[in-house]
Structure formats: C-alpha cells, structure tokens
C-alpha cells in the first residue's frame, strides 16, 4: 500500500495576529454585554 504525500500548508493563513486579537476582544465584549443584559432584565440576581 503506497503512502500518499503529506499535505503541505501555507505559512500564512490569510490573516494576521491583529485579526485574532480583535476577534477575541469582540467575543469577550459580547460575553460581558450578555451578562449585563441578563442582570438588567432579570432584576440583578444572576447566580
């Protein structure tokens, strides 16, 4: 059984670290926003 050649990935995946950092910050901001919204709507007893 012949082995296939291993797939070679490109070094650059199309975006840089700034895009990844911005995505993480955006996700954290969304999480904080949801926690605040739940506290406001639910009367502040979020446990």
Image (cartoon, helix red, strand yellow):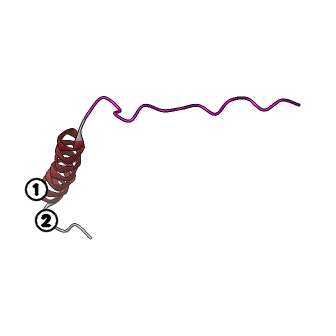
Q: Which residues are magenta?
A: 1-15
Answer whether residue 11 is magenta in the image. yes
The one of 40 and 31 positioned closer to us in this rendering: 31
Quadrant for the N terminus in the image: top right
Residue drawn at x 73%, y 29% is 4
- How far apart are labels 1 and 2 at the CA level? 6 Å
Q: Which corner quadrant of the image does residue 42 belong to?
A: bottom left
Taking 44 as reference, is 1 left or right?
A: right
Q: Secondary structure at mark 2?
A: loop
How far from the left and from the top, in percent, is residue 13?
Answer: 35, 32
Q: Secondary structure at mark 1?
A: helix
Q: Which residue is mark 2?
A: 44
Q: Which residue is mark 1?
A: 40
Looking at the image, is 36 positioned above or below residue 17? below
Taking 13 as reference, is 3 left or right?
A: right
Question: Does the magenta stretch mainly form a helix, a strand or a loop?
Answer: loop
Binning the other alpha carbons within 10 Å of mark 1 as few (below 14), some (14 to 19) or many (20 upward) gives few
Binning the other alpha carbons within 10 Å of mark 2 as few (below 14), some (14 to 19) or many (20 upward) gives few
Residue drawn at x 26%, y 33% is 15
- How many circles with numbers are drawn on the protein? 2
How far from the left and from the top, in percent, is residue 21?
Answer: 20, 47
Looking at the image, is 12 positioned above or below residue 36? above
How far from the left and from the top, in percent, is residue 22?
Answer: 17, 43
Q: Which corner quadrant of the image does residue 23 belong to?
A: top left
Whether the residues at callouts 1 and 2 have beta carbons within 8 Å, the answer is yes
The one of 28 and 1 positioned closer to us in this rendering: 1
């Amino acid at each position: 059984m012949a082995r296939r050649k291993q797939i070679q990935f490109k070094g650059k995946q199309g975006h840089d670290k700034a895009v990844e950092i911005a995505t993480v910050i955006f996700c954290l901001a969304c999480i904080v926003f949801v926690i605040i919204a739940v506290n406001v709507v639910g009367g502040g007893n979020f446990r």
